Image (cartoon, helix red, strand yellow):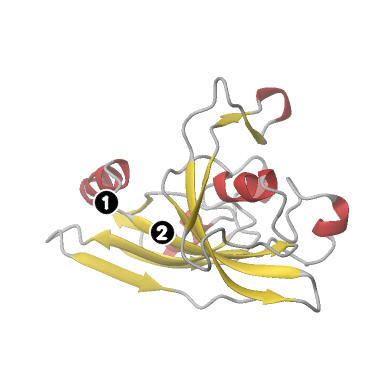
Amino acid sequence: MLVADKPAGLLCVPGRGEAGRDCLSARVQQQYPDALVVHRLDMATSGLCVLARGPQVQRRLSMAFAAREVHKRYVAVVHGRLESADGGTWSTIDLPLLPDWPNRPLSKVDLTNGKPSLTRWRVLAHDPATGTTRVELEPVTGRSHQLRLHLQAIGHPILGDALYAPPSVQALAPRLLLHATAITLPRPATGEPLTLESHVPF
């Protein structure tokens, strides 16, 4: 398998039109033609993304994701002073999410019809000068835009989020300040756990 460190602003898979051809999978396949995407990051999100060398490995890794044997960590900078309820350890956001079909690609919190969605988070640092909080995030489920929407729903949108933050918070950063910083997954050949990390670029 391969693990790429995707920059912000790059699609994981081809998008529409000529502009959508440049993407992570196309760039990797130039050097590794058998590389297949296993999971995706939002275009605006940077960080670690796993690709399989061939369909057999892709199937094994996809099964590991489905069985929740893969654990991902993200770092984000959010607007406002976010406080952990229990003094610095992990807290949770448990809000069901559903695609907002009239407004795709957005999703929304839907307490009646949404799919269960759970995010663990903890505070890493507060910055009183900017009125922001750096947080570590662990998505237990993997819904579309889950981290972005969950943080927005509790009143702390991610800086630079063009989809869910108000314009004043979008303008505080030149990009979405969300980075996939670590991933732990079973090695396809042996099942032994492997952890990979990426430096947070903001």
Residue shown at 65%/33% (left/top)?
A: 108
Q: Compared with residue 31, is residue 139 higher up or lower down, i.e. above or below?
A: above
Q: Which residue is mark 1?
A: 69
Classify the position of the C terminus by image quarter: bottom right
Residue 131 appears left or right of 94? right
Find residue 39 and report its horizontal and vertical position in percent. 42, 49
Residue shown at 67%/74% (left/top)?
A: 126
Q: Are marks 1 and 2 in contact (CB under 8 Å)?
A: no
Q: Residue furthest top?
A: 112
* Few, some or many residues within 10 Å of mark 2 (<14, 14–19, 20+): some
Alpha carbon separation for disc pair 1 and 2: 10 Å
Find residue 85 and report its horizontal and vertical position in percent. 56, 58
* In-front residue for pair 156/50: 156
Residue shown at 22%/47% (left/top)?
A: 60
Q: Which residue type does callout 1 highlight?
A: Glu
Q: Compared with residue 51, is residue 142 higher up or lower down, i.e. above or below?
A: above
Q: Which mark is residue 72?
A: 2
